[in-house]
Image (cartoon, rainbow, N blue to C red):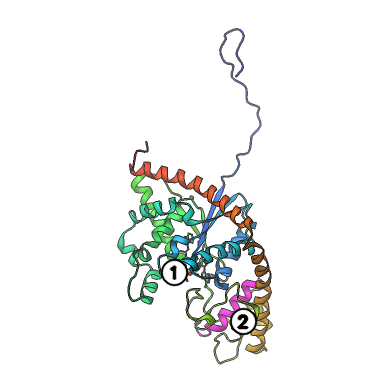
Amino acid sequence: MPVSKSTGKAKSIKKPDVKVPIPPKQKRLVSGIKPTGQLTLGNYIGALKQFVKLQDEMENTELFIFIADLHAITTPIDRQELKKNIRSIAAIYLACGLNPEKVNLFIQSEVNEHAVLGYIMESTAYIGEMERMTQYKDKKQKQTEGIRTSLMTYPALMAADILMYDADIVPIGDDQKQHLELTRNLATRFNNLYGDTFVVPEGFFPETGARIMSLSDPTKKMDKSNENHKSYILLLDDLASVRNKIKSAVTDSDALIKYDVKKKPGISNLLTIYSSLTNEPVKEIEQKYKDKSYAVFKADLAEIVADALRPIQQRYFEYINNPKLDEILNQGAERARLIASRKIEKVFKRLGMGRVK
Ligand code: ATP
Ligand code: LTN
């Protein structure tokens, strides 16, 4: 600092009269996918495609996208399969167009703080809230014995995943709405109890395709954990079987190509897939196929799906055995750990835990 010759005191510098623009606060986007199986077309349309779009469209936003392997052990899973799924999903993320320059891509279990904050969220949530979760009730029904405690408490871990990074925005499919609402409640409750700590996040739901349905039972969600292989399309399915699955998708008997989820769930689901992959509005697709048969519509859709998957599959094989994939995951985990460790320190302080001052 300059010093006055006469008084020896520090001279204050007159600031130039120019307004320096304050840079907008960086936003954060967080989302994850469970490595419980190979990814489906539902995951692609409802999640991956949205991540890529958001990465390209959102300015001033840092993305945290992770493979939620801690969530994958809420139900039994073979260790070799889990290992394979984790790597495969990471490669698919990149193959679908996630750019590691813009996105922190990492594996959840490599950032220990997730489990710690998950426990703290369990200590913020009430049992009644957990028991009310629709996904828990559905999944519990599918198992007869050995239902794991974490199947019920898992929304607390999901809340931790989101709140850890002060996420402003969380892109998710329709089925995760209830979990996000719970996350918002837990953040607010914690803030009220212990002082402002967490950002209350907003969900982001795709306009079309938030819920792609099963091809064999269009009243149920297309789900990679389903036992019927014809009910879903995997992103890595060979293209001949992709075409077959589309062609044998369940539709009704009146051959009218019209969107009506209640009366015609099968064809409505196929229209949604068509519209999500081509960006054509459903109304225009209905018009285009006004006088055409289901068979013609399905044959065209089969090609559209195959065309969408072909480049993804090509890029997938470039990544899967490439050490570059590990570099990207290391880099992502490092950045995530930095933010997560700071957050946990703050949370411990708020709670009066340990010796943090
Ligand atoms: P599981 O069958 O093990 O419950 P899942 O596919 O429902 O798995 P994730 O793989 O964790 O769950 O889902 C990742 C993202 O993909 C979530 O945002 C979820 O909402 C979205 N998603 C999953 N299935 C569909 C679907 N059929 N339609 C649209 N989005 C989906
Ligand atoms: N619960 C989600 C996966 C998931 C997630 C998250 C999504 C785990 N943690 C955080 C968004 C943000 C699912 O089952 N699809």
Quadrant in the picture for residue 78? bottom left
Asked whether residue 200 appears in the rendered view, the answer is no
Which residue is nearer to you in this view: 83 or 31? 83
Q: Main secondary structure of the magenta part?
A: helix
Residue 29 in sight: yes
Task: Please give the name of the residue rendered at 64% of the width and 52% of the height, measured from the top-left corner.
Answer: 101
Tell me the number on the disc at residue 77: 1
- Does 221 appear above or below 2? below
Magenta span contains residue 118: no
Tell me residue 141's x, y (percent).
36, 76
Residue ranking furthest to the bottom: 253
| Residue at 56% in and 62% down | 87
**Secondary structure of the residue carrying numbered label 1:** loop
Judging by the rendered image, the residue that carries numbered circle 2 is: 241
C-alpha distance separating marks 2 and 1: 26 Å
Q: Residue at x 33, y 66 (%)?
A: 131
- Classify the position of the C terminus by image quarter: top left
Query: Label 2: how many residues lie within 10 Å, few (<14), some (14-19) or many (20+)?
Result: some
Q: Are marks 2 and 1 in contact (CB under 8 Å)?
A: no
Q: Position of residue 148 (x, y in %)?
A: 35, 67
Return the residue found at the far left. Answer: 127
Percent x, y of residue 85:
53, 66
**Mark 1 Cα-neighbour bin, 10 Å: few <14, some 14–19, many ≥20:** few
Tell me the mark number nearer the camera, choosing from 2 and 1.
1
Q: Secondary structure at mark 2?
A: helix
Q: Position of residue 263 (x, y in %)?
A: 51, 85
Give, as a single range, the part of the protein colored magenta. 262-278
Which kind of residue does numbered mark 2 sit on?
Answer: Ser
